[in-house]
Image: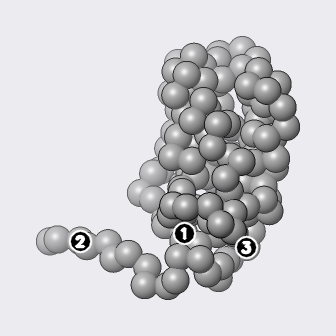
Amino acid sequence: MVSLSLLSTQHLGAQVDLDETDESAVAVINQFMEALMSGDFDSSAKAVLPFVHASLQTADRSSMDQDTLNYQFKKAQANAQFYRVPVQITRVQELRTTEIGHPSRGNYQKGTERKYWIAKKEGQAGLPAPLVVFFPEDGGQPTISYMGSL
């Protein structure tokens, strides 16, 4: 059986309809984006920690792991200035994730992920970019699980 995923035909600049789960994600995304733009690289890296999934953090949860800092966070922090805050969601995609993290690192969780495309500021060239949000099965706070496409 072949499964095809069709792109939304809705205008990319338009806000999509959001459900209750999406609304909680938007709140986290807005806080994350504000923290990204709150200062220099180091202070922003500390400010986003409460909104980033533990699988992207060091074992002691004092910072993001080095790979996340060097790649995902570096790109997101440099480009956050080009996106609307509060965010405008142009597309939502349910992902097939059922768990994230690893038991040996103490950050394993069951749950689901959704990808949210956020619009750029008026006058900024380019398409909306996705952020991935993880929703814990136990009902805990959603967190950003991928930020590297901003």
Label 2 residue SS: loop
Report the Cα–Cα distance between label 2 and label 1. 18 Å
- Residue type at mark 3 is Glu
Q: Residue at x 61, y 32 (%)?
A: 73
Q: What residue type is disc 1 on?
A: Val
**Comes first in the chain, label 2 or label 1:** 2
Nearer to the camera, 42 or 111:
42
In this figure, which residue is indicated by the disc labeled 3? 20
Res. 15 image quadrant? bottom right
Q: Nearer the viewer, mark 2 or mark 1?
A: 1
Check disc 2: other Cα within 10 Å, few if <14, some if 14-19, many if 20+.
few
| Amino acid on which disc 2 is placed | Ser
Circle 1 residues within 10 Å: few <14, some 14–19, many ≥20: some
Report x, y in % for residue 123: 65, 66
Marks 1 and 3, how far apart in space? 13 Å
Q: CA distance from mark 3 to mark 2?
A: 27 Å
Residue denoted by label 1: 92
